[in-house]
Image: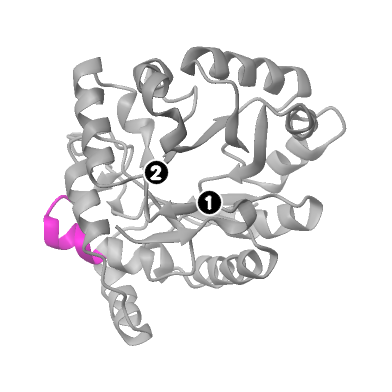
Amino acid sequence: METRKFGRTGHQSTVAILGTAAFGKTDQATTDEAMRLALDYGVNHIDIAPSYGHAEERAAPWMKTHRNEFFLGCKTMERSVEGARAELESSLKRLGVDHFDLYQNHAVKTIADLDEVTRPGGALEAMVKAQEEGLIRFIGITGHGVHSPAVFIEALNRFDFDSVLFPVNFIQFAEDQYRKDALALFERSAKDGVGVMMIKSICKGPWGDQPQTYHTWYEPFTGQAEIQSAVNFALSQNASGICTAGDTRLLPKVLQACENFTPLSETDQAEMIASAEKYEPLFKREAI
């Protein structure tokens, strides 16, 4: 599988980054099968969080024997210095590791969220201190929602974050302002040496009133050809890689698509974006 430079970290990340939200609603045997599959594909980067149900407990046995094979990223939704420090220590303990390669301010969706994180006494202070102590190596920021690319450009103006994580898919890119902001964030990140992770790459749209047949909080594409097209679009952007979807049943298809990634021309990408008019975007624009 292709690898790409993960910003200034010095790590070459596989274009498939193992998204462990998929482990939050599985048993240990299912998690073990998913971990073996990821290793078979050569995946070398994990994204995990305490908000992902039992994900940390499920991944912990694998950290005992495979910790050095992964660039390990974790997150906190805590906004205070005390809360972020406590959650960092809890995550380290649950996973049985002595440090994280990346620790991220999680779910920063608006400027108000960013203000909370970066204020005096905010979570960012805890991360800077933990970095000085060797508990984390790099500091990142993640977010969902239609404003995330613009919010992260402002975040990079305030602090030298090492990574960003936000949604990228051809349907969301049909929203002109989102696409403009995302492309500006890709450009800024490349200039500053910031690693970029993409999420929701195989998102088809919101579930709406239909039964939720997968653990993903959006309706995913499920056919291999559709997933391949969606992954091809995402990985054709100037980013490090995609986090795999939040359901282990989708993992084999996403890993296969990453393995078989074929870059799309600008014309091909434009055609995919034009085809998105038949879908409903996951995120709608509202006041920031």
Magenta span covers which residues?
A: 222-229
| Residue 12 position within the rendered picture, expressed as x and y whole percent measured from the top left | 48, 55
On screen, residue 214 above or below 58: below
Badge 1: how crowded within 10 Å, few (<14), some, or many (20+)? some
Which residue does the image show at 28% across and 39% down from the upper left? 39
Q: Residue at x 44, y 29 (%)?
A: 67
Taking the image as shown, residue 227 lies to the left or right of residue 173, namely: left
Give SS at disc 1. Answer: loop
Q: Amino acid at mark 1?
A: His
Is the residue marked by circle 2 packed among few (<14), some (14-19), or many (20+) residues within 10 Å?
Answer: many
Q: Residue at x 48, y 24 (%)?
A: 51
Q: In the drawing, does residue 198 fall left or right of residue 148?
A: left
Q: Is residue 129 visible?
A: yes
Q: Which quadrant, please, contains the N terminus?
A: bottom left
Q: Is residue 88 above or below residue 7?
A: above
Task: Kindly identify which numbered label has been placed on residue 45.
Answer: none
Question: Which quarter of the figure has residue 86?
Answer: top right
- Inter-mark Cα distance, 2 to 1: 9 Å
Q: Quadrant of residue 185?
A: bottom right
SS type, badge 2: loop
Say left or right for 275 vs 132. Answer: left
Report the disc number at residue 44.
2
Name the kind of residue labelled 2 in the image.
Answer: Asn
* Secondary structure mostly seen in the magenta stretch: helix
The reply to whether discs 2 and 1 touch (Cβ–Cβ < 8 Å) is: yes
Residue 147 visible? The answer is no
Q: Earlier in the sequence, mark 2 or mark 1?
A: 1
Name the residue beneath numbered marker 1: 11
What is the tally of numbered marks visible in this picture? 2
